[in-house]
């Protein structure tokens, strides 16, 4: 990558080690460094040596340098001249000598080697050393010509030679390399040289048996093994094509040879091999049907894999029926019911549950293949009763009655935060350095945790996603699900700092051209998305969570120690649930949370406020014992029924006034001045609302004073503030007198009741007088 550096790189980097070490401490971007840095000259590795520097009358000696920039003959003459006076220099000899430039010596007999013969045996110096090493202790030495015919020339580290291969094998190997390059695969010169060395005794790859071209038996050079396998594969495919064999006619498909497009790349080009075996189905008719469907539809790899899995599930279900589903004419409605039931009971490979939506999609894929067969005339013998029916429909997943189950508990998130420095460790991400990969995933995690955005919305953030607004920041993001772009979300300063630090670091990185506008770049320029994929984000978080030694849950075992938290419950989308649940538990207004989540319907947001009847009854049973009156004296409710039926929730507590209860809390005679009412019954679950009301009253009091309001107005506000503060102080004292376990129980009950009230009321009602139309017209 560095313009002035002659070194070649063969690893997962764009710089040699020398340039990488020099760039790391610099403040330059990769592009700026590559354009300006000049590495110190080092010894030449490979390539041709310089020519002798002796020049006479414009003619330069054409022999290779041997010493002091001179060829061997001129260096010997210079050495003899210097013996008379060791202080003499080479430059003085060049200025005074009468030596003449010489013609080049014959080239080394090794094919492709451009070096001169430098030895009586007729080899260049490098090949002479190799020849003597291989023949050490052997006499006679053998035929040099035959030995030279199998040798590779010495070339620079970024080059290779196919000269040692036979004529046919050389063309085959070159064709295989061209196919690899056309698919976007990298060609490592060192791996190619290793492969050439281990294949040079074969006459042809196309005619060799599998044993002789198996790279595993040749050594442990993984890159060289990959080169041999891919070249052999390309030659085999081309040889079959020459013989008229279509790879799609086989019952086992090579996805690359058939040309099945990849779903993971932008242009559909496949880089990894894959196979699909249509012989996996027990029923011959299903085997033929899936093969014909794939030949006709030519689906992408993801669609092909999904439909093949669906048909395999159906095949296994039919195999357990009478007759094994072998005869399509004998299939009945009961057989289709058995197939549908197999999809309903489907589990993941590890035995865990999957969503009904996924099951329904797989069943639909199987029915799509059947529909194709009927349209194409491939299932004319199939019974008409073997068809879908409304009773086979897999219903959607029922909404979780208690949505908090999807949220990661705050105690678990705190444990994750203590290990956040390990996130991204060991995750290979294109050419990005390991420390940059870690910084990228850690920044993405901080945004996921603190903003509640969906994984794809985080991974597709733009570089300019941060806007300063006064003393704070707003995140500019795109609601990909709702197709609402350029949304704005107020975020904490700490979260903004994650983005600023990563953005500064990211601007110094060399990213794929398509990723230049995105905060988190794609892994390569050919990736399906121009930004970090949500799949890679999920894999990084999964690997990180699995590497954490211990994660405690909030549930205690019988001996009082915390049970381990289930790690599969930690995934990127769960942080969105945690964000919403965190705000819902704090009793935030329903409309405010809807705006924060950018939900189109308030019903979606209300899911986070739902409390199961069992949890609500438990919360009421706990809270009824901690009710007080307006003086702060205990006034416990005799039962849970009394708590709910004999009172009504008003903004700052429960009310026992009969007419207000009948009106659902909307007929307060003293306009919600609750602290002065004898029917006022607050409990700890109302403390946040009371504290907010105290702050509001204080603001109203200052406004009244600024307006020069009458003394009774200011005095009324003062007394309300004092009365509500007294209520809060007494509740706090009662809470402080309880044990930690009792306080934790009350806090959980308070969260449940606040969510329940928010869901039932929709919003906190203001103390306004409702005037009916007939009263207004009177």
Image (tube, rainbow, N blue to C red):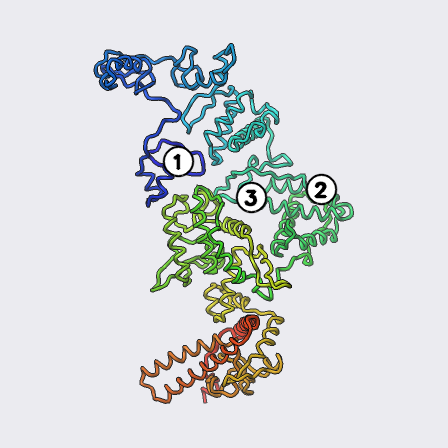
Q: Mark 1 to mark 3: distance in Å? A: 38 Å
Q: Mark 1 to mark 2: distance in Å? A: 54 Å
Q: At 39% across and 19% down in the image, what residue appears?
A: 114
Precedes in sequence: disc 1 or disc 3: 1
Task: Write down the residue under mark 1.
Answer: 16
Which residue is at the front of the view, 266 or 473?
Answer: 473
Which residue is at the front of the view, 356 or 724?
Answer: 724
Q: At 46% across and 55% down in the image, what residue appears?
A: 458
Q: Residue 307 location, x and y as percent?
A: 62, 46
Q: What element carries label 3?
A: loop
Precedes in sequence: disc 2 or disc 3: 2
* Residue 519 vertical placement versus 245 (above, below): below
* Residue 552 vertical placement versus 307 (above, below): below
* Residue 262 vertical placement versus 53 (above, below): below
The single residue placed furthest to the right in the displayed view is 322
Q: In this view, does 277 lie to the left or right of 737?
A: right
Instruction: Decide: few, some or many residues near mark 2? Use Cα within 10 Å; few <14, some 14-19, many ≥20.
Output: some
Q: Residue 533 location, x and y as percent?
A: 48, 49
Task: Write down the residue under mark 3.
Answer: 300
Q: In which quarter of the image is the C terminus?
A: bottom left
Q: What element carries label 2?
A: loop
Q: At 33% across and 83% down in the image, what residue appears?
A: 705
Q: What element carries label 1?
A: loop
Q: Residue 80 location, x and y as percent?
A: 28, 12
Task: Name which quarter of the figure residue 25 lies in.
Answer: top left
Task: Write down the residue under mark 2.
Answer: 282
Q: Mark 2 to mark 3: distance in Å? A: 24 Å
Q: Is residue 105 left or right of residue 617?
A: left
Residue 238 can be seen, yes or no: no
Q: In this view, does 561 lie to the left or right of 102?
A: right
């Amino acid at each position: 990558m560095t313009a002035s550096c002659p070194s070649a790189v063969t690893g997962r980097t764009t710089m040699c080690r020398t340039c990488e070490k020099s760039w790391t401490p610099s403040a330059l971007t990769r592009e700026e460094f590559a354009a300006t840095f000049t590495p110190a000259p080092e010894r030449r590795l490979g390539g041709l040596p310089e020519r002798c520097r002796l020049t006479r009358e414009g003619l330069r000696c054409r022999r290779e340098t041997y010493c002091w920039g001179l060829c061997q003959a001129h260096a010997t003459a210079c050495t003899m001249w210097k013996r008379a006076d060791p202080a003499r220099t080479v430059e003085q000899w060049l200025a005074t000598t009468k030596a003449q430039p010489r013609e080049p010596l014959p080239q080394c007999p090794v094919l492709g080697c451009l070096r001169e013969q430098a030895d009586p045996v007729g080899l260049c110096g490098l090949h002479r050393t190799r020849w003597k090493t291989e023949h050490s202790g052997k006499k006679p030495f053998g035929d040099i010509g035959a030995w030279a015919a199998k040798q590779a020339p010495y070339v620079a580290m970024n080059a290779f030679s196919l000269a040692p291969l036979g004529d046919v094998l050389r063309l085959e190997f070159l064709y295989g390399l061209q196919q690899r390059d056309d698919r976007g695969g990298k060609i490592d010169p060192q791996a190619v040289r290793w492969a050439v060395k281990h294949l040079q005794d074969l006459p042809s790859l196309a005619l060799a048996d599998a044993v002789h071209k198996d790279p595993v038996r040749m050594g442990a050079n993984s890159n060289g093994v990959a080169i041999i396998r891919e070249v052999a594969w390309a030659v085999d495919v081309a040889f079959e094509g020459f013989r008229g064999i279509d790879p799609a006619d086989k019952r086992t498909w090579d996805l690359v040879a058939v040309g099945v497009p990849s779903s993971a790349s932008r242009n559909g080009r496949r880089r990894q091999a894959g196979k699909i075996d249509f012989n996996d189905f027990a029923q011959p008719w299903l085997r033929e049907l899936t093969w014909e469907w794939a030949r006709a539809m030519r689906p992408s790899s993801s669609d092909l894999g999904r439909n093949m899995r669906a048909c395999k599930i159906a095949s296994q279900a039919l195999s357990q029926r009478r007759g094994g589903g072998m005869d399509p004419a004998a299939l009945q409605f009961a057989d289709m019911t058995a197939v549908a039931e197999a999809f309903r009971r489907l589990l993941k490979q590890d035995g865990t549950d999957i969503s009904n939506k996924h099951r329904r999609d797989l069943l639909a894929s199987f029915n799509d293949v059947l529909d194709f067969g009927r349209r194409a005339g491939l299932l004319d013998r199939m019974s008409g009763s073997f068809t879908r029916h409304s009773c086979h429909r897999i219903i959607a997943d029922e909404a979780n009655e208690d949505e908090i189950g999807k949220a990661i508990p705050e105690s678990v998130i705190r444990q994750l935060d203590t290990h956040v420095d390990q996130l991204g460790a060991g995750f290979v991400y294109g050419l990005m350095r390991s420390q940059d990969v870690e910084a990228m995933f850690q920044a993405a995690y901080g945004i996921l945790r603190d903003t509640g955005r969906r994984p794809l919305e985080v991974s597709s953030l733009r570089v300019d996603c941060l806007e300063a607004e006064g003393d704070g920041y707003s995140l500019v993001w795109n609601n990909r699900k709702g197709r609402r772009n350029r949304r704005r979300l107020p975020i904490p300063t700490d979260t903004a700092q994650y983005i600023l630090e990563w953005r500064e670091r990211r601007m110094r990185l060399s990213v794929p051209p398509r990723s230049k506008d995105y905060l988190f770049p794609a892994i390569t320029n050919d990736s399906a998305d121009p930004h970090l994929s949500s799949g890679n984000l999920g894999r990084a978080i999964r690997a990180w969570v699995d590497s954490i030694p211990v994660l405690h849950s909030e549930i205690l075992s019988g001996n009082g120690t915390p049970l381990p938290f289930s790690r599969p419950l930690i995934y990127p989308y769960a942080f969105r649930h945690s964000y919403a649940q965190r705000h819902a538990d704090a009793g935030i207004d329903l409309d405010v949370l809807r705006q924060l989540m950018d939900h189109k319907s308030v019903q979606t947001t209300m899911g986070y406020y739902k409390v199961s009847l069992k949890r609500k009854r438990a919360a009421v049973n706990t809270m009824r014992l901690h009710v007080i009156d307006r003086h702060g004296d205990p006034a416990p409710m005799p039962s849970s029924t009394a708590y709910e039926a004999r009172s009504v929730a008003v903004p700052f507590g429960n009310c026992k006034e009969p007419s207000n209860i009948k009106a659902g809390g909307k007929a307060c005679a003293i306009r919600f001045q609750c602290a002065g009412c004898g029917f006022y019954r607050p409990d700890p679950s109302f403390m946040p609302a009371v504290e907010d009301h105290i702050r509001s009253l204080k603001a109203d009091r200052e406004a009244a004073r600024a307006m020069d309001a009458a003394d009774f107005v200011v005095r009324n506000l003062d007394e309300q503030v004092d009365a509500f503060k007294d209520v809060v102080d007494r509740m706090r004292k009662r809470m402080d007198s309880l044990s930690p376990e009792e306080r934790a129980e009350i806090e959980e009950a308070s969260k449940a009741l606040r969510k329940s009230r928010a869901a039932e009321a929709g919003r906190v009602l203001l103390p306004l007088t409702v005037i009916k139309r007939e009263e207004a017209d009177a």
